[in-house]
Image: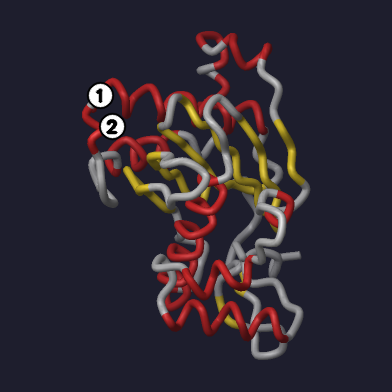
Amino acid sequence: SPDRRGTRLSTKTSRLVSLNDSAMKVTSVTLLKHNGENTDPFLLGNAVELSSFGFFQRGTVKEMLVFVSRTICKRTANGVRQSVAHEEYMGHVYNKNGVVAIIFCDKEYPARSAFCIVNKVLDDYVGKMGDAWTGVSADSTDGDAVCQEAIEKYQDPAQADKLLAIQRELDETKVILHNTIDSVLQRGEKLDSLVEKSSDLSMASQMFYKQARKQNACCGFM
C-alpha cells in the first residue's frame, strides 16, 4: 500500500504516512556512546534521510528516531549485535567496545547488508576519533559526517554488499532478533513512561505519540 510508511498526518488514524515507499530505504544512521544499562547513552553522530516524509512531520520523525535509537542502545550490551523490528522498520545495532552504531531501514533491506553498514560506520568513526570518544560526556556531533556519508552511499543494498568481502566475521556472528521494541525493554519498563521522560522528544512529539496510541494507530517509529 502506498500509505504504509509515515509522513502526513491522517485525521482518521493519526498515522505518519509515506509519500513514496516503493524502494528500500535507510532512514537513519546513529552513533552513540554506551554508558551502561543504568545511564542514558550519549549521541556521537546522526544522519537521517526523510525525503519520503511530509515536510511538517520530519522534525517529529527525527526526534523519534533518536529516542528509539538511544533506547535500544542502552539495552545492547558490549559485543552484542541485534535486530529490533518495529512496525514496518528494522533497527540493526552493534555495540563494539562501548561505541554503538544503529541504522533504521525498511524490513525489506537485507540484514547482512545493514550490518555491513553498521560495521563500516563504527570503523570509520573510531578511525577518525581514536580513543577521544571515551572522554565524551555529553551529546556530540563529531560523528555526523561519518553517518551522513553512510546514509548517502548505502541507500542501495548492493553498495553495502561490496563490504561483505572484507567483513567475514559476520558469517560467524549470531544476531539476536527481537520481535518488537517492547521485548528489548527491561522487565517492568513501559515505552509510554520512557516517552514522557525523554529529553529527545519535544512536547509536540509526545502529544503526537499519545494521540496515536489512544487511537491504537501506528505512529511510524514508536
Residue 43 coordinates in the image, percent (x, y): 35, 48
Amino acid type assigned to the residue bearing label 2 in the image:
Thr
Above or below residue 74? Residue 202 is below
Badges 2 and 1: C-beta atoms under 8 Å apart?
yes
Residue 50 coordinates in the image, percent (x, y): 46, 59
Residue 116's image quarter?
Answer: top right
Q: Nearer the viewer, residue 171 or 202?
A: 202
- Quadrant holding the N terminus: bottom right
- Quadrant holding the C terminus: bottom right
Mark 2 lies on residue: 134
Residue 125's image quarter?
Answer: top left
Give the number of the disc on residue 180.
none
- Point 44% across, 50% down: residue: 39
Task: Identify the element where label 2 is drawn.
Answer: helix
- Point 76% across, 79% down: residue: 216
Residue 9 coordinates in the image, percent (x, y): 58, 82
Mark 1 lies on residue: 131
How far apart marks 2 and 1 lie (CA) works out to 6 Å
